[in-house]
Image: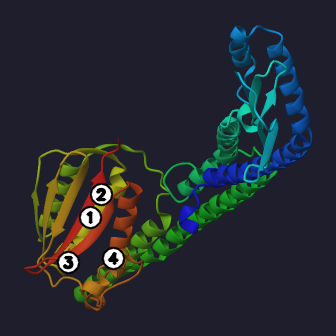
Amino acid sequence: MKRLLPSTLAGRIILVLLVGLMAFHVGSLWLHQTGSDILLGSTQQKVTSERVAAAARAIGMVPPEAREAVAQALSSPGFQVRWQSGAMVGAVAAQDLAHTGHLQAEGAVNLPDGSHLWYHADPLQAQPEHATLLSTTAMALGILVLGLLVVRLIARPLRELSSAADRIGRPGQTVTVPEEGPREIRQAAQAFNRMQARIDRLIADRTQALAAVSHDLRTPLARLRLRAGFLEDAEVQRQIDADLDEMDAMIGSTLAYLRGDEEQEEVRSADIAAMLQTLCGDAEDMGKSAIYEGPPQARLPCRAIALKRAFANIIDNAVKYGTSARVVLSDPGRELVVHIDDVGPGVPEAQLESVFQPFYRLEESRNRRTGGSGLGLTIARQAVSHHGGSVTLQNLTGGGLRASIRLPRPA
């Protein structure tokens, strides 16, 4: 039964209108027809008798050679007469057709000159059989057209509400929903706008708090780094600086994740190929193995800083946990596809999706040597998702891990 129902609100409203009004129309027709049958049943014999008598008088007044033509002229779809010479016994015969509910009469009347007039009366033939069907069809079409117009007016605020709800959490300014339409729609729009305002205030308060936390945390780190510079033991100084660098990196990555797209970076055309070549060059300068393969240029409208951070996190993971990174860029036209392969141990199949969760780290990375905050892949997927793209991981057959980034080009 549910499969037969339309999936949209407009379809269901029109279906209810059609079924209800058609049932009302059919019921009205039945009541009207029943009343008409009762009335016709009581008057049909009298009307038929009067018409037969009038036809007999009219035909009896003309010469015999013109009587058949007059009989044809007096005939109609519900009343037919024919003149024949010679008398007929049994002047009138009538029968009631139970399956129609109408009185159908048939018989003959002898004229004074010895001829007779045959007649057949059927009230059903006096009315077109398709009148009810045409009336019902016209009403259904009228209801359908009117229902479409009304439903479009009702559903438009709902579509705007759905579109505004879908924009929550995406880059760009939030847009309030027009508070117009029926009272229920206005109340829903007002509630939605109040909810959206509360979310905006919550995000603004969180951003302000993060800025304060960033300042408060980095200030003592700077003092510790300064004091470490006065230590005479170079090895202890190096260890302290490494710990401070790790803490500073963890604070930076955490703030970058929590800040999300609040930086409101402007979308502009950037060369993704040059971006990847720069990141591979930076890794090479740090003594890591990272090579780039692909076209010399591939431009894409994007938020370049956020996207560069995403690529940097994935390449950094590849050279850190997989000893090397092979970055391959392809440009089929409608999207850019970047594959970043390493030759490391890979990731267990059951954890290929879990590693994108915030602060999730594999056991192999939970040590002082590799560090990591568990936010690199999370930040990367967040940035790519804001561009309408995707980031997936796949273990390679010969060993190693492949990170695939797809970035669609705007229409």
Q: What residue type is disc 3 on?
A: Lys
Nearest-to-viewer mark from 2 and 4: 2
- Marks 4/1: CA–CA distance: 17 Å
| In the image, residue 79 above or below residue 392 | above
**Residue 320 circle label:** 3
Mark 4 or 1 closer to N-term? 4
Mark 1 or 3 closer to N-term? 1
Mark 2 residue element: helix
Mark 4 or 3 closer to N-term? 4
Question: Which residue carries the number 2 mark?
Answer: 308
x and y percentages locating residue 120 in the rendered image: 74, 33
Mark 1 residue element: helix
Mark 3 or 2 closer to N-term? 2
Question: Which residue carries the number 1 mark?
Answer: 312
Question: Which residue carries the number 4 mark?
Answer: 245
**Residue 323 circle label:** none
Q: Are marks 4 and 3 in contact (CB under 8 Å)?
A: no
| In the image, residue 218 above or below residue 61 | below
Q: What residue type is disc 4 on?
A: Asp
Which residue occupies 59% across, 55% down?
8
x and y percentages locating residue 135 in the rendered image: 70, 37
- Marks 2/1: CA–CA distance: 6 Å
- On the picture, is 274 further left or further right than 153? left
